[in-house]
């Protein structure tokens, strides 16, 4: 039985990677989808895959760093569906210049707006629907960089993703009385297009050992299908072949 039949899910960063995987798995569970990303063409491709599975998906491209564009999607969801049950707050970005020695004010602004401000904008759109329903789940993609400080992801990305973790916990603190649940997912290394921004390129063999987008998508589906009286506040998902652990082991030899 489709566990999300009659539910509406808004997935951001839905054109590829984790967002695409989550969208397809939520569609398998019967959810009607709203797909958002910057570029229409990848979203249309995902919508076609959803349709091929017998699901429905509305394409709503937007730059989520623009609060007006986020509000417009909220208005669309209200007019088209009149409800919102699931927000997969997945859109995010990183940049190649990461160290303080090369980081600019423009880069900092892009990182904070692209990872934290945009996520908060989407929450402000989702919560009124969910409060009215006395039900809803928000699932935010942070990162292990949102818990562990290291030079790998860069200071701007790390600080913004820490903010996403804090944001999610504050939602539970305030909105639990309204039946609203917020979960922040902290992936380790995931083989997604964002890795193309790394200064040092990774091999096919290295990518194959990482968490895959489908692994995280399946976790998001699990969280979305939990009963209303349960919330997973925070969850880590990392590769078994954890390169940070292995580096630490080798450093001790």
Image: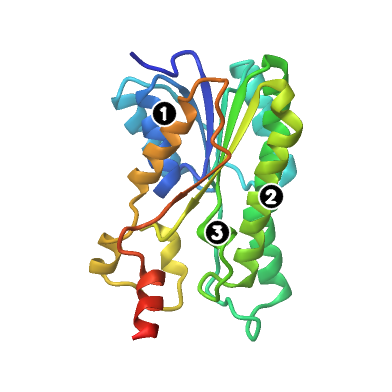
Tag 1 and tag 2, C-beta contact below 8 Å: no
Few, some or many residues within 10 Å of mark 2 (<14, 14–19, 20+): few
Instruction: Specify whether residue 69 is in view.
Output: no
Q: Nearer the viewer, mark 1 or mark 2?
A: 2
Q: Residue furthest left?
A: 205
Q: Position of residue 22 (x, y in %)?
A: 42, 37
Few, some or many residues within 10 Å of mark 1 (<14, 14–19, 20+): many
Residue 26 marker: 1
Residue 115, placed above or below residue 88: below
Residue 93 marker: 3
Spatial distance from mark 1 to mark 2, Cα to Cα? 26 Å
Q: 50 or 163, which is in the foreground?
A: 163
Instruction: Specify whether residue 232 is in view.
Output: yes
Q: Residue at x 34, y 45 (%)?
A: 215
Q: What residue would you read off at disc 2?
A: 166
Q: Look at the numbered disc 2 and give the secondary structure of its residue.
A: helix
Q: Earlier in the sequence, mark 3 or mark 2?
A: 3
Residue 99, placed above or below residue 223: below
Q: Nearer the viewer, mark 3 or mark 2?
A: 2
Q: Residue at x 45, y 25 (%)?
A: 225
Residue 205, placed above or below residue 247: above
Q: Position of residue 112 (x, y in %)?
A: 68, 60
């Amino acid at each position: 039985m489709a566990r999300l039949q009659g539910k509406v899910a808004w997935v951001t960063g839905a054109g590829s990677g984790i967002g695409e995987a989550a969208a397809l798995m939520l569609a398998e569970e019967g959810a009607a989808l709203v797909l958002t990303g910057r570029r229409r063409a990848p979203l249309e491709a995902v919508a076609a895959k959803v349709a091929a599975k017998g699901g429905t998906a509305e394409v709503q491209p937007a730059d989520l760093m623009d609060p007006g564009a986020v509000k417009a999607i909220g208005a669309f969801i209200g007019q088209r569906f009149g409800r919102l049950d699931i927000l997969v707050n997945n859109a995010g970005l990183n940049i190649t210049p990461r160290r303080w020695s090369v980081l600019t004010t423009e880069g900092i602004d892009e990182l904070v707006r692209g990872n934290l401000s945009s996520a908060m904008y989407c929450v402000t759109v989702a919560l009124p629907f969910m409060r009215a329903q006395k039900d809803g789940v928000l699932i935010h993609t942070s990162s292990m960089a949102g818990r562990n400080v290291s030079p790998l992801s860069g200071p701007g990305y790390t600080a913004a993703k820490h903010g996403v973790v804090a944001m999610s916990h504050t939602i539970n603190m305030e909105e639990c009385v309204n039946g609203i649940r917020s979960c922040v997912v902290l992936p380790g290394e995931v083989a997604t297009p964002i890795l193309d921004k790394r200064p040092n390129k990774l091999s096919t063999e290295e990518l194959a050992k990482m968490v895959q987008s489908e692994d995280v998508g399946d976790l998001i589906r699990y969280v979305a299908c939990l009963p209303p009286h349960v919330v997973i506040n925070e969850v880590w998902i990392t590769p078994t072949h954890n390169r940070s652990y292995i580096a630490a082991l080798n450093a001790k030899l």
